[in-house]
Image (tube, grey):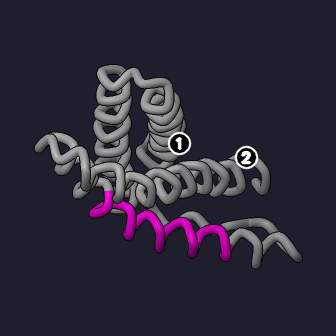
């Protein structure tokens, strides 16, 4: 099996796991379980870092995979893809700043950026999974 055949599924799994960590982290902070929130969010960061490593490896080693959908779904797919990629590039430094503030104990500034980081990160995770499904399962 080649990286082109394996890595998209690995990255989708990591993306889904990061999404689970994000949702758990949100629930934990809303219910006052700060210790579990921290663990979940660090899990999301670690999982997302692994995702990014495998994603880069995939795109360095695999040929370009062309979307095979036709008709009205093509502009929907590309709008989703463009918003996903743009916000993924934007959210990466946002996550860094958010985590840095939390680890430094700056709990006044941390929630202010986290309120923006979380929804963008959730959107990027969900749309990443949708793009994966459209590329490798729905329109093959």
Q: Which residue sits at x=60%, y=69%?
A: 81
Is the residue 89 above or below the residue 137 in the image? below
Between 7 and 21, the one nearer to me in the picture: 21
Q: Which residue sits at x=68%, y=67%?
A: 67
- Determine whether, in the image, residue 108 is placed left or right of residue 104: right
Q: Which residue is mark 1?
A: 12
Span colored in magenta? 78-94
Q: Position of residue 112 (x, y in %)?
A: 35, 57
Checking the image for residue 137, the label placed there is: 2
Q: Residues within 10 Å of mark 1 (few under 14, many from 20)?
A: many
Between 25 and 78, the one nearer to me in the picture: 25
Q: Secondary structure at mark 2?
A: helix
Q: Quadrant of residue 131?
A: bottom right
Q: Position of residue 108 (x, y in %)?
A: 25, 50
Q: Position of residue 139 (x, y in %)?
A: 78, 56
Residue 82 drawn in magenta: yes
- Determine whether, in the image, residue 88 is placed left or right of residue 73: left
Q: How many marks?
A: 2
User: Looking at the figure, which quarter contains the C terminus?
Assistant: bottom right
Q: Earlier in the sequence, mark 2 or mark 1?
A: 1
For discs 2 and 1, the disc positioned in front in the rendered view: 1
Residue 118 drawn in magenta: no
């Amino acid at each position: 099996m080649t990286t082109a055949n394996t890595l998209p599924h690995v990255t989708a799994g990591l993306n889904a796991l990061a999404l689970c960590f994000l949702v758990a982290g949100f629930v934990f902070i809303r219910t006052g379980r700060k210790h579990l929130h921290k663990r979940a969010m660090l899990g999301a960061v670690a999982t997302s870092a692994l995702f990014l490593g495998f994603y880069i490896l995939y795109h360095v080693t695999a040929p370009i995979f062309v979307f095979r959908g036709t008709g009205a779904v093509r502009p929907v797919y590309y709008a989703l893809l463009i918003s996903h990629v743009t916000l993924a590039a934007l959210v990466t430094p946002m996550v860094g700043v958010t985590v840095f503030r939390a680890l430094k104990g700056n709990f006044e500034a941390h929630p202010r950026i986290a309120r923006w980081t979380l929804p963008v990160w959730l959107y990027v995770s969900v749309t990443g999974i949708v793009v994966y499904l459209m590329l490798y399962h729905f329109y093959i």
